Image: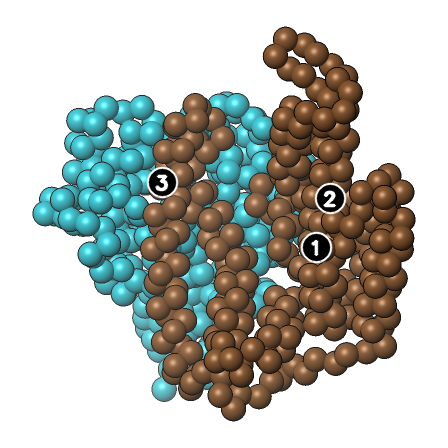
């Protein structure tokens, strides 16, 4: 189960998207969140779809793999879809079956919102799939640097983020290990009623938390022992480099937004 | 209970960019009431293999037979729970699985999952605690107030209390002090000798493998490299050394000594200290040492 989840995971292959400056990728993903809302008719949604699809192709990661890995998020999409279909009461009445009434507006809204969600998930996953956690935090730190003047703890934030991201795989591994150990002691995580399954989580969560706290303690000691004193005067091993392709990518996104604005109703 | 594999193969994350073949063409039999040691380099597939022994992993091709149950690569198998009752696994650093408020509750956890009443489980907890060399005082303590070594014993007791027919141990003594080590290893050995339990031991210690096991499986790069009695396995120490594995200290001593004096001491490599002593004595008796 765990091994199939790709949300927040980096896949080391060679591609244009992988080579982009993380700052450019961060800016584009951030802007994309707004760009998605520009679409409001079939034409514009189609264009967004084509754009997302091309970006995926360029990443050199098998699309079937991405879709499979994000399967569990589709439930969320389905949920929002159903919510819209049943609760938006606009336009013509399409189906009336007892208390269930589906309106045209609801159907269209449902499809649109689901598509929006879908594109957003694909696009943001693309960021984590093609960028190492370290690159992401480096990029973020560099982008947020101006905020330092306002006494905003940029370095500390970036450090927290990078530690959090760094330990996701470790925690996943550990979850799996503890799960197996408890399964060997007769816990069934996948069978039984909802309450028994919820109860089965306790023997998993407690050891996980205890180990996480222990690890945090050890990490702090190890960092201090290696002379960590905060961000002041700290130099970087990896330097970020803004290339032509980064500017180009940004321009493409701007062109896309302009087209969307022109094509929307 | 016998465990048998046929062309067992296991691939991690099949059909993904991370696909990695961990095991292939594994054909082994672990007979009833036997003591089998699995040795091999880190990454040779030992830990992956032993997770098949109670159905935590299912082979991606081939099959494994545990008692009467055959597990192949088909979809999720039923009846795994009954297998897990019969095959207990003590994982590496088992103290990481402790979670209850008291030692007693934690040891009772396994047996109760397998349908024992609280009273019965408590009786077993007391017994298991004794087996791992701790007294009843510990029952009401929090497992998190104990030392690392004590936690390890509690975790092992938690598996023993399930009364498995086969006990699978993944480096059970890693990180323990030398005395704790021998105590625990001797305890496992007596379970095998007196209670008829089968033991499967994954270890890096060649001394333990040669001292306790009656069969040794040498794993190399995901498959079985060699299978035999300790005598057969350690008969060609050079071969193991070439694989990057260790040999028992007694053999290393013998090899070094033979190299220094330029003569063979015994007819075969000494797989125990006793054998080494005998070999040296008989060599001395022959009287040709200065």
Residue B118, picture quadrant: top left
Q: Nearer the viewer, mark 3 or mark 1?
A: 1
**Kind of element beneath mark 2:** helix
Task: Calculate the distance from the C-alpha at mark 3 to the C-alpha at mark 1.
Answer: 37 Å
| Mark number, residue A141 | none
CB of mark 3 within 8 Å of CB of mark 1? Answer: no
The residue pinned by badge 1 equals A33
Q: Residues within 10 Å of mark 3 (few under 14, many from 20)?
A: few
Where's the N terminus of chain A, which quadrant? top right
Q: Using residue B174 as the reference point, say whether residue A243 is left or right of it.
A: right
Task: Report the disc number at residue A116.
Answer: 2
> In the drawing, does residue A22 fall left or right of residue B246?
right
Earlier along the polypeptide chain: callout 2 or callout 3?
2
| Relative image position of residue B227 (x, y in whole percent) | 55, 48
Q: Which residue is mark 3?
A: A202
Callout 2: chain: A
**Chain assigned brown:** A
Q: Is residue B52 left or right of residue A15?
A: left
Position of residue B103 measured from the top left corner of the image (x, y, whole percent): 21, 45
Q: Nearer the viewer, mark 2 or mark 3?
A: 2
Crowding at label 1, few (<14), some or many (≥20) Cα neighbours within 10 Å? some
Q: Chain of mark 1?
A: A
Is residue B269 or residue B65 the one in the foreground? Answer: B65
Dot 2 alpha-carbon crowd within 10 angstroms: few under 14, some 14 to 19, many 20 or more: many
Q: Colour of chain B?
A: cyan
């Amino acid at each position: 189960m765990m091994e199939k989840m790709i949300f927040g995971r980096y896949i080391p292959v060679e591609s244009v998207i992988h080579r982009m400056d993380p700052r450019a990728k961060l800016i584009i993903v951030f802007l994309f969140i707004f760009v998605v809302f520009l679409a409001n008719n079939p034409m514009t949604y189609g264009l967004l779809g084509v754009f997302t699809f091309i970006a995926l192709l360029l990443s050199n990661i098998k699309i079937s793999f991405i879709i499979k890995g994000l399967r569990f998020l589709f439930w969320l999409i389905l949920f929002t879809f159903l919510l819209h279909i049943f609760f938006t009461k606009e336009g013509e009445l399409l189906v009336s079956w007892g208390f269930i009434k589906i309106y045209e507006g609801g159907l269209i809204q449902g499809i649109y919102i689901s598509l929006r969600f879908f594109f957003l998930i694909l696009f943001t996953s693309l960021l984590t799939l093609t960028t190492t956690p370290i690159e992401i935090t480096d990029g973020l730190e560099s982008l947020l640097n101006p905020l330092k003047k306002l006494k905003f703890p940029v370095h500390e934030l970036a450090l927290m983020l990078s530690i959090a991201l760094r330990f996701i795989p470790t925690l996943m591994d550990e979850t799996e290990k503890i799960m197996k150990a408890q399964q060997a002691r007769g816990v069934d995580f996948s069978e039984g009623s909802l309450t028994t399954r919820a109860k089965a989580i306790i023997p998993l969560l407690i050891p996980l938390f205890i180990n996480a706290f222990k690890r945090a303690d050890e990490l702090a000691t190890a960092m201090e022992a290696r002379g960590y004193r905060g961000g002041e005067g700290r130099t970087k091993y990896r330097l970020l480099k803004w290339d032509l392709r980064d500017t180009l990518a940004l321009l493409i996104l701007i062109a896309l937004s302009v087209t969307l604005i022109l094509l929307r109703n | 209970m016998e465990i048998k594999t046929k062309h067992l193969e296991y691939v991690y994350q099949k059909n993904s960019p991370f696909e990695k073949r961990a095991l292939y063409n594994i054909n082994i039999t672990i007979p009833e009431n036997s003591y089998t040691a699995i040795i091999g380099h880190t990454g040779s597939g030992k830990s992956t293999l032993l997770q098949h022994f109670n159905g935590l992993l299912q082979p991606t091709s081939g099959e494994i037979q545990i008692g009467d149950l055959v597990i192949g690569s088909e979809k999720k198998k039923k009846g795994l729970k009954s297998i897990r009752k019969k095959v207990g696994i003590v994982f590496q650093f088992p103290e990481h699985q402790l979670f209850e408020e008291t030692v007693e509750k934690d040891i009772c956890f396994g047996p109760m999952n397998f349908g024992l009443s609280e009273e019965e489980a408590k009786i077993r907890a007391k017994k298991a605690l004794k087996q791992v060399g701790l007294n009843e005082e510990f029952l009401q303590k929090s497992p998190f107030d104990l030392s690392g070594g004590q936690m390890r014993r509690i975790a092992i007791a938690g598996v023993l209390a399930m009364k498995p027919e086969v006990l699978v141990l993944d480096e059970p003594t890693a990180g323990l002090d030398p005395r704790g080590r021998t105590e625990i290893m001797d305890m496992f050995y007596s379970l095998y000798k007196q209670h008829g339990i089968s033991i499967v031991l994954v270890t890096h210690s060649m001394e333990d493998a040669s001292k306790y096991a009656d069969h040794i499986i040498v794993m190399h790069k995901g498959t079985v490299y060699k299978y035999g009695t300790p005598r057969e396995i350690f008969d060609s120490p050079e071969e193991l050394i070439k694989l990057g594995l260790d040999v028992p200290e007694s053999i290393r001593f013998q090899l070094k000594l033979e190299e220094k004096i330029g003569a063979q001491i015994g007819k075969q490599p000494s797989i125990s200290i006793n054998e080494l002593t005998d070999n040296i004595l008989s060599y001395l008796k022959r009287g040709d040492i200065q």
